[in-house]
């Protein structure tokens, strides 16, 4: 189990993307809902082709999935990775770190995430 936890993740997320602060704070401390705000932000960035924000978000998610505690790792898998729609965004798939790619493919195999036509 990693040492990184929700408070550390949220501080870094809010410091990196201050515009998310109000939406995250409105989730009343519920980690999976906070992660849903993050996932929605990333999905909008993917739709807009914003490679800079997508790359930053994926790097952040990879770090906290790899080194986070069990609760954080679960929230990233269930409320972030599982909800990404990368079907029309091969470029975004290429930005995803190896650990999260592996998690995404496991979710596809389990029927929990959308399969990617380019793989």
Image (cartoon, rainbow, N blue to C red):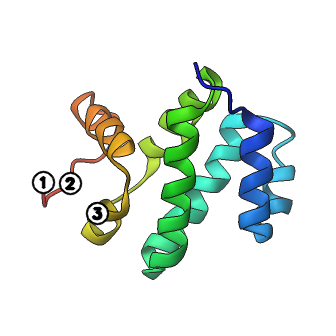
Residue 41 falls in image quadrant: bottom right
User: What residue does disc 3 label?
Assistant: 94
Residue at left offset 80%, top offset 39% = 7
Distance (Cα) linking label 2 and label 1: 6 Å
Q: Quadrant of the C terminus?
A: bottom left
Q: Residues within 10 Å of mark 3 (few under 14, many from 20)?
A: few
Q: Residues within 10 Å of mark 1 (few under 14, many from 20)?
A: few
User: What residue does disc 2 label?
Assistant: 116
Numbered mark located on residue 119 in the image? 1
Q: Nearer the viewer, residue 84 or 57?
A: 57
Residue at left offset 45%, top offset 44% = 81
Where is residue 65 shown, x and y percent of the image?
A: 52, 37
Find out whether the residues at labels 2 and 3 contact each other: C-beta distance under 8 Å: no
Distance (Cα) linking label 2 and label 3: 12 Å
Where is residue 9 shown, x and y percent of the image?
A: 71, 44
Q: Is residue 56 above or below residue 68?
A: below
Residue at left offset 42%, top offset 53% = 84
Of helix, strand and loop, which one carries label 3?
helix
Q: Is residue 70 above or below residue 78?
A: above
Distance (Cα) linking label 1 and label 3: 11 Å
Q: Quadrant of the N terminus?
A: top right
Q: Is residue 38 left or right of residue 23?
A: left
N-term-proximal mark, 2 vs 3: 3
Q: Nearer the viewer, residue 93 or 15?
A: 15
């Amino acid at each position: 189990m990693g040492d990184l936890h929700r408070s550390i993740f949220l501080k870094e997320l809010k410091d990196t993307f201050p515009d998310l602060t109000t939406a995250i704070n409105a989730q009343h401390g519920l980690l999976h809902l906070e992660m849903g705000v993050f996932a929605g932000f990333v999905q909008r960035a993917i739709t807009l082709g914003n490679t800079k924000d997508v790359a930053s978000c994926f790097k952040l998610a990879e770090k906290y999935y790899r080194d986070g505690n069990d609760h954080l790792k679960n929230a990233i898998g269930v409320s972030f990775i599982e909800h990404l729609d990368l079907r029309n965004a091969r470029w975004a798939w290429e930005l995803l770190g190896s650990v999260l790619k592996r998690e995404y493919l496991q979710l596809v195999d389990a029927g929990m995430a959308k399969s990617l036509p380019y793989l």
